[in-house]
Amino acid sequence: MATVLLKRKIGHRILNGHPWIFGNEIQDIKGDFLPGDTVVVETHDGKFLGKGYINPQSQIAVRLLTRKKTDEINEDFFLDRIRSAWEYRKKLGYVENCRLIFGEADEMPQLIIDKFNDYFVIQTLALGIDKWKPAIIKALETLFSPKGIYERNDVPVRELEGLAQQKGFLSAPFKTDIIINENGLKFHVDIENGQKTGYFLDQQDNRRAIQHIVKGADVLGAFCYTGTFEIHAAHYGASSVLGLDISANAIAQSERNARLNRVDHVCKFMEVNAFDILKQWTKENKTWDVVMLDPPSFTKTRENIQKAITGYKEINLRGIKLVKPGGFLVTSSCTNLVHPELFLETIHMAAWDARRKLRQVVFHTQSSDHPIIKGLENTNYLKFLIVQVL
């Protein structure tokens, strides 16, 4: 096993728990290795820091798997890690649908596993973890005896690791349109063609948070994707619900989910550019009791943070203007580079421009099956806010 030595002034961040080692932090590498191999990481003076997988092609040259010298990185290691992650989810009550493995938060960098009842979707986003895919599949089969396992590695980030984009069955083929239960409702999950792994589990707890404010309300939902928030609103007693999305496929899925839950008489959906139509409706002085905004990430790079903030301010300004006095704005951001404090500040700047006062109801992160580790900003990404608009 090769040994990576860090530069003299590097190491405090690693000692404090961060699992990433950048290429420009490495002083020397002793021994031979292949990209994706496991290596030992030491300080410049030979003190053990951990073991992880290396890929010189990546900007993040080493991703640490363990801090224990005695750990052997083998099939049993991954079986134990996945078992430990499952025990954590079970203690919190996430037994049917959950993010089973959340990358660095579960000490398995760049591995995502989502559990949809008896089906599993895997993403291996770094070369090192991709090499262990057979061991991961074996562990899932041992622990769960799943009905199916599917790979959703059709994501551009893999190319930064020298990996091809791909997707397909990692088990015997199965019908990839499955139905899950969430908060007393049912939703179609398109494992093969849906966004990310087919469904956004990170908002499952937040969708319950709207239950009281939507009762008897006229509700508008922008960026509805497959209609989960909108269908929850109807389920919780909304008088009418209108969902907007620019994707024809998303609208079709939303309508399908509304029929599945027998709320299609309450929920209506429009294929439209939300930015444009919200601007038009503010000019027409249209209003709703509750406006919900759940846009996709506005940036993946630090260079575009200001553009993202401008986008969040603009969409929330329009949303606030469409809320009746005393009504509620429900708004989210999944851009991890926009920190919680900055997101709140952006919402309040939008309210200031709209000449409206806000009263905070709840401010949440993602559901607890996506655990947050202090110092790892990519684990603390979702902001979910409900405010009363006065």
Image: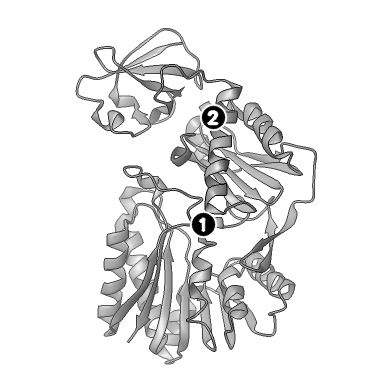
Q: Are marks 2 and 1 in contact (CB under 8 Å)?
A: no
Residue 104 placement (x, y as % from top left)? 44, 38
Of all residues, the one furthest to the left in this rendering is: 9
Q: Earlier in the sequence, mark 2 or mark 1?
A: 2
Task: Decide which of 94, 75 is in the foreground and name it.
Answer: 94
The 10 Å Cα crowd at callout 1, few under 14, some 14 to 19, many 20 or more, is some
Q: Is residue 77 left or right of residue 28?
A: right
Residue located at (31% from left, 42% from top): 375
Task: Decide which of 389, 144 is in the foreground and name it.
Answer: 144
Residue 4 placement (x, y as % from top left)? 36, 16
Q: Is residue 331 left or right of residue 16?
A: right
Asked if one can make out residue 271 in the rendered structure from this viewpoint, the answer is: no
Circle 2: residue type:
Ile
Of all residues, the one furthest to the front in this rendering is: 91
For disc 2, the marked residue is: 129
Q: Secondary structure at mark 2?
A: helix
Of all residues, the one furthest to the top in this rendering is: 31
Mark 2 or mark 1: which is in front?
1
The 10 Å Cα crowd at callout 2, few under 14, some 14 to 19, many 20 or more, is many
Q: CA distance from mark 2 to mark 1?
A: 23 Å
Asked if one can make out residue 245 in the rendered structure from this viewpoint, the answer is: yes
- Total of numbered circles in the picture? 2
Q: Which mark is residue 264?
A: none
Residue 139 placement (x, y as % from top left)? 65, 31
Residue 150 placement (x, y as % from top left)? 69, 42
Q: Secondary structure at mark 1?
A: helix
Residue located at (35% from left, 77% from top): 317
For disc 1, the marked residue is: 202
Q: Quadrant of the C terminus?
A: bottom left
Circle 1: residue type:
Asp
Residue located at (76% from left, 44% from top): 147
